[in-house]
Image: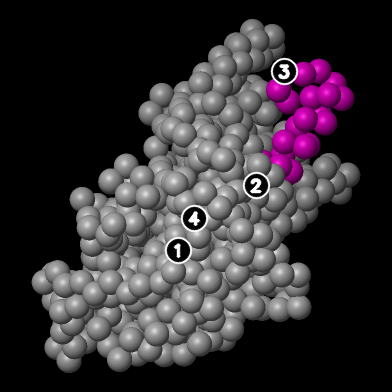
Amino acid sequence: MKGWAGFIAALVAAIGLAILGTTPPGPVPDTAGAGAFSAGRAMIDVRQIAEKPHPTGTPENAEVRAYLVNRLKSLGLEVREVDLPLPQLSTERMQGWSKGSHAPTRMVNVIGVLPGKDRTLPAVALMAHHDTVWGSPGAADDTAGIATILEAVRAIKARGQPLRDLAVVITDAEELGLSGAEAFFASDPLRARIGMIVNMEARGGGGRTTLFETSPDNGNAVALYADAVSRPGASSLAAFIYSVLPNDTDLSVSLRADYPGYNFAFIGRSGLYHSPLATPERLDQGALQDMGGQVLALTDRLVRSPSLPQASPSVVFFDVFGLFLVTYPAWIGWIMVAAIGLGLASAVRRDCRLHAVLGGSGRMLGMMLGTGVALYALNLVSGAGSQANYYDRLAAIPKLEIMALLACAGMFLLAFGRGAGKAARVGATLVLAVLGAIAQLLAPTAAYVVLIPVLLAVLALCLPGGPGKAIGWLGAALVLGYEIYLGHFAMQGVGPTMPFVVSVPLALATLAILALWPGLAPRAARRGALAALALSLLVSLWVRFDPIADTVAVYSSDKNVPAIPITKPKK
């Protein structure tokens, strides 16, 4: 048991850190001070707005708009409604959702401005959308964003008049193709006065809120965010991944028009996305508090600053379990690549046999490729594919996470269950060092996710005695915790279609723990691997044959028929 103590201690610490990083703060009650963001207060608006579905052009939507106009006026804003023609494609989408029972031809944006001390300065705009899809109350998407705006404006006003105007842009017809945002940024006179935009979205009903997108050349914008927000949730990796996905939000329209901005969202409880069960009672109030706390801190700093962040080279940024934000210039990654290369060369020269190094490299490559292939196959068994119901797949994410975890455990035991000597660890590190260098070349703001764990592993290999062991244990706890955290968010984001992406977090977690892993007897390792993979297959079959989730969108009720597309293709 003595040989297991260090590994178990690191594992316990890692799980604790992962829980810390993925858990939103508790909701602040409505008795909080006037200058604080209170989810308790914001929920009053959520309950009123998300009482029932309110798609574009319905009487229920008109009721929501009337409520918003009154709320904004009560907060001291100059308010107007802007009635606009709805594009034909948006009308056709609504007709499809409603099975021909509703064909709106108009949309209405709600615009407000809280006057600042100097109205000649560029305004800061808070943006969300007030429409829902057909059949969903939309407590998260996007009532949480609207409630965040209302509570943030109230708190900012309570702290004293801001230096610059604070604009509120609540768009219509976002769900029908970003139509309200397109109209606003094409013709609304306020658009010329906006100097920064903060947009809020949701895909689900809970979890941590993440700054997942910024405008290009974000160095100064990220620096201001890091300084303003006390419990950040942000990642340049998420921003890079989102940039290559075929999804859009209202902020996409403004970015195409060269406005600077920030985009926040939470994606936990994904089964509630566009769901008839997306009610106020099912909204995670901690997620609302997380969104509100970050948006209020950032916006208050922006509206009281004499100047807004100007374009500067994009930086690497990521939060460390929600405790603080790390930022550094992207070129630092090349220094890490060089340090890793020198460290590995030193380790190989000292006492490593070439065949053992190559064996370690082969085992790491085999584990990564095997995990990818296994998860691709398991996902097909679970029912993934072009005919899968998108919303049913979202509801299956918790089961798919279990499937992926078991598959990863099985592949780890097959590749490294017996343990690994120093030469094998050097070989395994070499594979990920090459991956890190490629990532630095192709995606420098996302490469940190590989380079930092590899650098810690190299330090543990190269430093003698106590320091090396200390860095090895600390690195194991931190990296394993971060990879659990990263794997969770990866599965929430793309798990229903691409669970094989977790092969990278698995490889990095493996690298971190190899020095502490005491190893199993070969027979025990094989049996453990086969058991884990068999259980993973059973979970996959469970997902395939369970009934369709009761959370799926009302316009998508067949488990084996794809939903009407909900993504807004990039233009």
The boundaries of the magenta stretch are: 459-480
**Eye-nearest disc, 3 or 4:** 4
On the image, the x and y values in percent for residue 310 come to: 46, 34
Q: Quadrant of residue 342?
A: top right
Q: Which residue is mark 1?
A: 113
Distance from Cα at disc 1 to Cα at disc 3? 59 Å
Tell me if residue 123 comes above or below residue 137 in the rendering.
Answer: above
Task: Give the dominant element type of the magenta stretch: helix, strand or loop.
Answer: helix
Mark 2 and mark 1 lie on one chain; the one further toward the N terminus is 1
Mark 1 and mark 3 lie on one chain; the one further toward the N terminus is 1
Instruction: Tell me if mark 1 has few (under 14), some (14-19) or many (20+) residues whose alpha carbon lies within 10 angstroms of its own.
Output: many
The secondary element bearing badge 1 is classed as: strand
User: Do the numbered discs 1 and 4 sit on residues whose CB atoms are within 8 Å?
Assistant: yes
The secondary element bearing badge 2 is classed as: helix
Q: Which residue is mark 3?
A: 462
Tell me if residue 147 comes above or below residue 302 in the rendering.
Answer: below
- The amino acid at mark 4 is Asp
**Eye-nearest disc, 1 or 3:** 1
Q: Which residue is mark 4?
A: 165
The secondary element bearing badge 4 is classed as: loop
Please tell me which residue lies in front, 412 or 447.
447
On the image, the x and y values in percent for residue 69 come to: 43, 79
